Image (spheres, grey):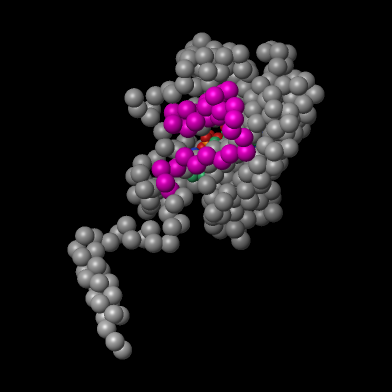
Amino acid sequence: MAYTQGMLRDDALQNKTIIVTGGGTGLGKSMATYFLTLGANIVICSRRFEVLEKTAEELRELTGGQVLCVECDVRKTDQIENVIQKTIEKFGQVDGLVNNSAGNFISPTERLSYKAVDVVVDIVLRGTYYFTLALGKYWIDKNIKGTVLNISTTYAWTGSGWVVPSAMAKAGVLAMTKSLAFEWADHGIRLNAIAPGPFPTKGAWERLFPEELSKKFSFENRIPLKRVGDHQELANLAAYLMSDFSAYMTGEVITLDGGEVLSAGQFNFLNEVTDDQWDAIEDQIKNANRNSKKPE
Ligand code: HXC
Ligand code: NAP
């Protein structure tokens, strides 16, 4: 067994229809691919229709599954409602939603225009609550026990400089996840989230680690487990959270980051201390202990 392999049984998502926003690229595409192999019908939506069409064709060939693609800017409620309508026309109903679409780029915050902040917050936060609200109304009306998975980030809790609009928006998404998990539990609707560490994708790497940066900093070295994530690892967790195997879990945020977020631990800088230095440090501390036992 390896973490690069699928984890769930082949029919884990049989008869479920799942909408994956931003499913034409990156992690959304990887999750959509795995959901298809587990028997789900998949709807992918985002702004660039040609990208969606190309991915849909590729996924149909790869998995033999059913894929619908619909153009949608998640900041536009009429376009969201159109996705839901088209999904119901083709598959009969909607069972799950993965809020995966995002916009992000690194920048000193004082360099941002108001519009630059808005564009990221609107895609991430507004897009997520619009889509969730539209489906929640439909699920409650039709008495469907829907499932939502929100793709967040670890800095939604810790905060992070240089990605402030994204941090603000992802934090709002977490607040929504936990709040609605409680409120909509009465309707059998579940909401969970994943906070991924670095998983290489073209979209994220071009905007967050352009060459100027990637030449200087290596992600792998900063991560306790010394590697970036593999897309299948994230797809495995996402599939579990979208399946009935996680039926007792709601309002949860699962971090999948090789321990990266733990680097906030106050003494974690000690990972740079050598064995020889530890010998000297131990001697110094034991000396200090002995001295403190002597009368003043
Ligand atoms: C300063 C910038 C900028 C930059 C854009 N802007 N890039 N300002 N520094 N590097 C400003 C523009 O000048 C403009 O403001 C405003 O932002 C909107 O820019 P547009 O290009 O007109 O917007 P648009 O074409 O809608 O593109 C949206 C986008 C873009 C968010 C800017 O990056 C995008 O399409 N992203 C989608 C995919 C993505 O971001 N994927 C990465 C997700 S990764 P003015 O005022 O000049 O008009 C992620 C993971 C994080 O979230 C964790 C990783 C470990
Ligand atoms: P990505 O490939 O750039 O995915 C972002 C997707 O969002 C794209 O498919 C894009 O498609 C879509 N999108 C952007 N604006 C949209 C809009 N207004 N309406 C609808 N769709 C829109 O990057 P990724 O790395 O796979 O990111 C996927 C998710 O993982 C994001 O939520 C991101 O924050 C999260 N994440 C990623 C990492 C990582 O290391 N990769 C780490 C933590 C969290 P269009 O351009 O066609 O619209």
Q: Position of residue 225 (x, y in %)?
A: 35, 44
Q: Nearer the viewer, residue 55 or 287?
A: 287
**Quadrant in which the N terminus appears:** top left
Number of marks in picture: 0
Q: Nearer the viewer, residue 172 or 187?
A: 187
Asked whether residue 244 is drawn in magenta, I would say yes
Quarter of the render that holds ligand 1: top right
Q: Position of residue 194 (x, y in %)?
A: 54, 38
Using the rendered view, name the quadrant where residue 74 is placed: top right
Q: Position of residue 228 (x, y in %)?
A: 39, 40
Magenta-tinted stretch = 231-260
Asked whether residue 257 is drawn in magenta, I would say yes
Side (left or right) of 56 relative to 234: right
- Residue 256 visible (yes or no): yes
**Quadrant in which the C terminus appears:** bottom left
| Residue at the image position 69 percent from the left and 38 percent from the top | 182
Side (left or right) of 244 relative to 63: right
- Residue 29 visible (yes or no): no
Q: Residue furthest right?
A: 141
| Residue at the image position 25 percent from the left and 69 percent from the top | 281
| Residue at the image position 59 percent from the left and 27 percent from the top | 247
Q: Position of residue 20 (x, y in %)?
A: 60, 27
Q: Residue furthest top?
A: 64
Side (left or right) of 214 relative to 144: left
| Residue at the image position 69 percent from the left and 27 percent from the top | 188
